[in-house]
Amino acid sequence: MEFAQFVRSNGRWLSGAFLLTFFSSFGQTFFISLSAGHIRAEYGLSHGGFGTLYMVATLASAATLPWLGQIVDSRSTRQVTLIILPALAAATLAMAVSSHIAILAVTIYLLRLFGQGMMTHNAVTATARWFERSRGRAMSIAVIGHQAGEGVFPFVFVALSAAIGWRLSWLAATVLLITIALPVTAYLNGPERTPLGTAGDPAYPANRGMTRKQVVRDPLFYALLLGIMAPGFIGTTIFFHQIYLIELRGWTAEVFAVAFAVMAAMTVTFALVSGQLIDRFSATRMLPGFLVPLGLGCLTLALVEAQWAAFAFMGLMGLSYGFSSTLFGAVWPEVYGLKHLGSIRALTVSIMVFATAAGPGLTGFLIDRGVPYTAQITTMGIYCFAASLLLVPVSRMLTARGLYRTD
């Protein structure tokens, strides 16, 4: 009842952040990959060639994000939206009309930078600033726009491509972004929300916080990254090599595809659950536990050959994903404050993108050199437990030195 009242009272801001993550789908891997076959055919690229181009473009976007992401510290959420959403629309238009491989590379770079990067960055940073004592609940609603996009856009794009072709489908995405996404999100994100009880309060976290230079000199920052990078690294790696895993186990692709639905359901459920827990206990106190389900899932996937292992892994990964998606938006403002949150988050997102880009390549390198894939997955599981143990004293030290909260 309390949660429903919270949503009704803050529907405008929650909807604005949710739609930013929802429309970030056009720059996410799951959406771009829907056109991978057509792109390889029309540009004469092999699987490896397109994979390399995609990796380079993604890494370039990650390198740009720490610089560009700082604008959320100096401009309003609406102003940033009016910059990044037209840029994303321009990238979708370029995908629809380009014919040269150099333009394709720039297009993917822009899709990744403004879609995956800035749309999400703007939404999560704004939500962290707009909400203080209810930050966890607000963040849990904002971030599930990603899962909503994963549930809606693949089906729509595949159906549309079958009817009008893949290029015109990208053109339709451009029209959607310009005619609907831009005016709606700009309207919803128009007024900046001030958390209740904080207006004019000099102690409010928006008026204080560490700079990015101070953060990179904090040893606990790197301890946090060791845990926070794990879900993206592991998830991207296993999904990238899913066909190889299916062949190793003798499973069917259909079974693994169905298991994705289990992960999606668990992610949404536990994103909302974790939001409630974060508001009650704080994000830093939740840090030691969020990797444990992922660790159990990796060990199950590595050691069990029966098909139910795929569903167990996806369910446990969804549990960790749900917690981490909300946790990552809430932990940085708690630990380092809000004044320079945009530049800090831009750095952390950039590091995570680098980690996810490196995962598939590193694992593929080890596979080519005879290192069993199941042994690698086992190592990932052990890493999750080791990181969880490390985060126990980290959580205590962060709590002891004081958090940027006004509760």
Image (cartoon, grey):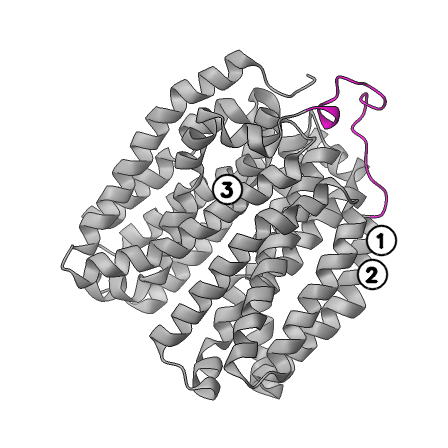
Q: Quadrant of residue 361?
A: bottom left
In this orientation, does residue 152 appear? no
Give residue 174's position: percent from left, percent from top. 70, 73
Q: Position of residue 327 (x, y in %)?
A: 54, 35
Q: Amino acid at mark 3?
A: Gly
Q: Position of residue 20 (x, y in %)?
A: 69, 53
Q: Is residue 25 above or below residue 315?
A: below
319 relative to 332, above or below: below
Residue depicted at x 40% and y 45%: 317
Measure the C-alpha gap from mark 2 to mark 3: 30 Å
Residue type marked 2: Pro
Please state the extent of the stretch shown in magenta in the rendering: 190-208
CA separation in Å, label 1 and label 2 = 6 Å
Q: Around disc 1, counting alpha carbons within 10 Å, would you say few (fewer than 14), some (14 to 19), or many (20 or more)?
A: few
Is 155 above or below relative to 166?
above
* Residue in view at x 69 percent, y 77 percent: 172
In the structure shown, which secondary structural element does the residue marked by tag 1 occupy? helix
C-alpha distance separating marks 3 and 1: 28 Å
Which residue carries the number 1 mark? Answer: 187
Element type where label 3 sits in the image: helix
- Which quadrant would residue 152 be assigned to in this image? bottom right
Q: Is residue 206 magenta?
A: yes
Which label's residue is closer to the chain start, 3 or 1?
1
Q: Mark 3 highlights which residue? A: 322
Q: Nearer the viewer, mark 2 or mark 3?
A: 2
Q: Residues within 10 Å of mark 3 (few under 14, many from 20)?
A: many
User: Which residue matches tag 2?
Assistant: 183
The answer to whether the residue labelled 2 contacts the one labelled 3, judged by CB atoms less than 8 Å apart, is no
Disc with the residue nearer the chain's start (2 vs 3): 2
Question: Quick check: 153 left or right of 390?
Answer: right
> What is the secondary structure assignment of the residue under circle 2?
helix
- Asked if the residue under mark 2 is in contact with the one under mark 1, i.e. CB atoms within 8 Å, the reply is yes
